[in-house]
Image (spheres, rainbow, N blue to C red):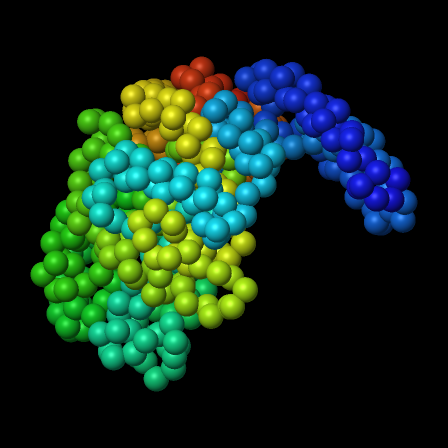
Amino acid sequence: MTDPFDERDRAFPVLRMVTDAAGPYLESLSSRPVHDGGADALIGELEGPLPERGEGARAAVERLLRVGTQAATHSSGPRFFHFVVGGATPAAMAGDWATSLLDQVAGLWLASPLASRLETTVLEWLKDLFGLPASFGGVLTPSATLAHVTGLAAARSWWAERHGVDVSAHGLAGLPPMPVFSSGLVHASTRKALQILGCGRDTLRVFARDDAGRVDLAAMDEALAAVEGRAVIVANLGEVNTGDSDPIEALADLAERHGAWLHVDGAFGMFAALSPRTAHLARGVERADSVTADGHKWLNVPYDTGFSFVRDRGRLRQAFGAWGAAYLESAPADEERIDYNTLGPESSRRARALPIWATLRAYGRDGYRAMVERHLDVAAHLGKLVDSAPDLELMAPVQLCVVCFRYRPPGVPEDRLNELNARLGEALLADGRVYAGTSSYRGMTVFRPALVNWRTTKGDAELLVDVVRELGARLAPPSS
């Protein structure tokens, strides 16, 4: 088989192989280990040199499905607690399959009015869901990192303009470093965005009043006065180790008083706005100049999806538009015919709006509120289990969907706990029944499982505790 044209009439049977495999695979996620120790050998069957003569679509896809359904890390299942990863709701997965089927060119309205109009629709729905003003501009991105790039690029244009420079046209040469201030809760993706934008990842200044990273408002106030408000404040809603958040309302007050730009990192924390139990954490985001969030976290749509919202709609086009490519005929600039590739860093874009539209249409505000509150309940349950176990230690109050704890059996001295928990983290991932890696918090090695998958239940949290304690007992020194 050498030319896909030869299989033009046999596409559906190959696609049917995927749908036939999907049912058993999805049904198995609730009971199968997250990771199979034999995956490495299986993956080897997919490697090797490029074949001169292809084996045909049916044989290739059969091989991929056979190996993939066994060797994949089953991160779409209910016990993948590593990082902050949701799964894909049934509607979102179907919407993503439809995205591949339709294969829209989503950057230009002229190329796909469907993709452009649905992106406008889901951005409006998301603003409504999060309590952001309808007047905000927005764009879908591949991730929160690229959403940071988008929002901070708008901030960079605003900042350079205050120095009399059009940074999109003339760059940063001759300008001083852009002051960026945050608390110790700042995520590495913010620094990466500053690195990409040429602002420098290490130019960000942290103002923290304790080793947990909580913001020092007085020190930041003084620093803002020193730069006459020509600065960007990054507020963090939902920190990855504990779920902690900055006081966004207070930071909004600082930004307003000094005339600074307020950027909110709400990668998963933005979903706190959905529940009356946690909405206070998100109070003040409506006053921000730019806001970012992730879709493949608590929204539970497939990788990869992020959102960026900017108060001044024109800043996005200023930062990313005006390429001057004659063959890329742009739609007239209006509220309906939008070229989204002029509002963000991507030129060629997947139609990410389709799975978002499908899941929000399917479950609505009430369905997502119910899911968020169920996860809050599961996280609180896990926190209580940890707190009541004699060999586990809860390291921070449970505020959202992240539970920070460590293994601390009686008799093990403090100076040996980091090494013990690091070895336990490796053992947990190798075991594969549940997936929750380690992190560093206040100088201590900890576990910080994130509970955002739509399938996750209290039983999954209970299994995590059981497995951690079982493996920990094998690793702890006898004297403990």
Task: Using the rendered image of the protein, determine whether residue 469 is visible from the camera's viewpoint.
Answer: no
Q: What residue appears at the point 13 percent right and 50 percent down from the top-left corner?
A: 250
Q: What residue appears at the point 58 percent right and 37 percent down from the top-left corner?
A: 102
The residue at the far left in this view is 257
Q: Is residue 269 above or below residue 197?
A: above
Give percent across and percent down for residue 433: 58, 24
Q: What residue appears at the point 28 percent right and 44 percent down from the top-left corner?
A: 237
Viewer-nearest residue: 415 or 177: 177
Viewer-nearest residue: 144 or 211: 144
From the viewer's perspective, tell me whether residue 460 is left or right of residue 383: right
Give percent across and percent down for residue 303: 52, 39
Give percent across and percent down for residue 332: 37, 57
Q: Is residue 224 above or below residue 104?
A: below
Quarter-wise, where is residue 379 in the image? top left
Give percent across and percent down for residue 51: 87, 46
Q: What residue appears at the point 38 percent right and 79 percent down from the top-left corner?
A: 170
Viewer-nearest residue: 13 or 176: 13
Quarter-wise, where is residue 7 in the image? top right
Count of picture labels: 0
Task: Using the rendered image of the protein, determine whether residue 91 is visible from the camera's viewpoint.
Answer: yes
Viewer-nearest residue: 222 or 344: 344
Query: Could you tell me which quadrant the N terminus lies in?
Result: top right
The residue at the far bottom in this view is 174
Quarter-wise, where is residue 411 in the image? top left
